[in-house]
Image (cartoon, grey):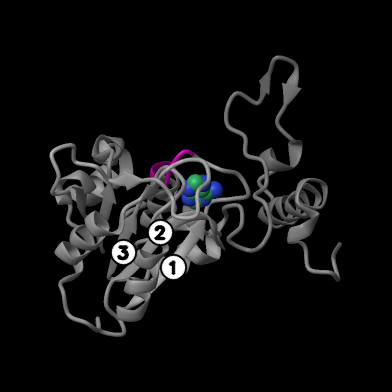
Amino acid sequence: MRIDIVTIFPEFFDVLDLSLLGKARQSGLIELGVHNLRDHTHDRHHSVDDTPYGGGAGMVMKPEPWGDALDAILGTDPALVDDGPLVIFPSPAGDQFTQRMARELSLEQHLVFGCGRYEGIDQRVVDHYSQRGRVRLVSLGDYVLNGGEVAVMAMIEAIGRLIPGVVGNPESLVEESHEDGLLEYPSYTKPASWRGLDVPPVLRSGNHGAISTWRHQQQIERTERVRPDLLPRTLS
Ligand code: ADE
């Protein structure tokens, strides 16, 4: 997968050199381009924002640097191909990012993330690229971050680890929270007893059927307690 990111803080993404995603980049599973929006400004101060039309607090990101930066990645064809790059703007006003969305996005060939700051990006940037190709606004959750960078990091981590080959043991992806609509069961390792707390005996029984049943019950119990909204109506 190819991932391009446009941001005024390219250093934010230095951490993508680390860990599993760093390895995925080295092995060519993920190809990453991080682009500084300020490289696409043409004034002395490299301004990327201005006051909002209509008044109000804060600053809005200007459309011209965004147009130049995105055209440099996407090209200038008036219509991008149907299955061409998907442009994602992280925004608290977007569709909620979920494991299901991460899975869908992990099938894409080319993702382009545009990290807004301040009070957002001039709406015409979204409108223009929506006319030319596929654009989505995506929210990490119902809270406001200072900019899209942290949201993009989270999305890239969630998407990247679903690309075949990125996580060494694909089985470890199957039994995680949200993959089957439930939260994951609790996990334990050695020692069998720690500070007076014992590992549940069933996990040391060697009875795989009983272990599997226990884990599933734990998933349901935990989901009912913490996230009843995830349960189908018949279970809750
Ligand atoms: N930018 C600011 N807040 C955000 C959020 N909650 N999700 C995605 N992008 C954002």
From where the camera sits, is residue 59 visible? yes
Q: Is residue 151 magenta?
A: no
Please report contact status of discs 1 and 2: CB closer than 8 Å, yes or no.
yes
Query: Which of the marked residues, 1 or 2, is nearer the chain's N terminus?
Result: 2
Q: Earlier in the sequence, mark 1 or mark 3?
A: 3
Place of residue 64 in the rendered image (x, y in percent of width and height, measured from the top left) = 24, 58
Q: Which residue is mark 3?
A: 111
Label 1: few (<14), some (14–19) or many (≥20) C-alpha neighbours in 10 Å: some
**Which residue matches tag 2?**
89
Q: Nearer the viewer, residue 6 or 200?
A: 6
User: In the image, what residue occupies the spot 67% across and 52% down?
Assistant: 183
Task: Locate residue 219 relative to residue 187 in the image: left or right.
Answer: right
Q: Which residue is mark 1?
A: 136
Which range is magenta?
146-150
Q: Secondary structure at mark 2?
A: strand
Q: Mark yes or no: residue 165 visible.
A: no
Across and down, in percent, residue 156 comes to 38, 52
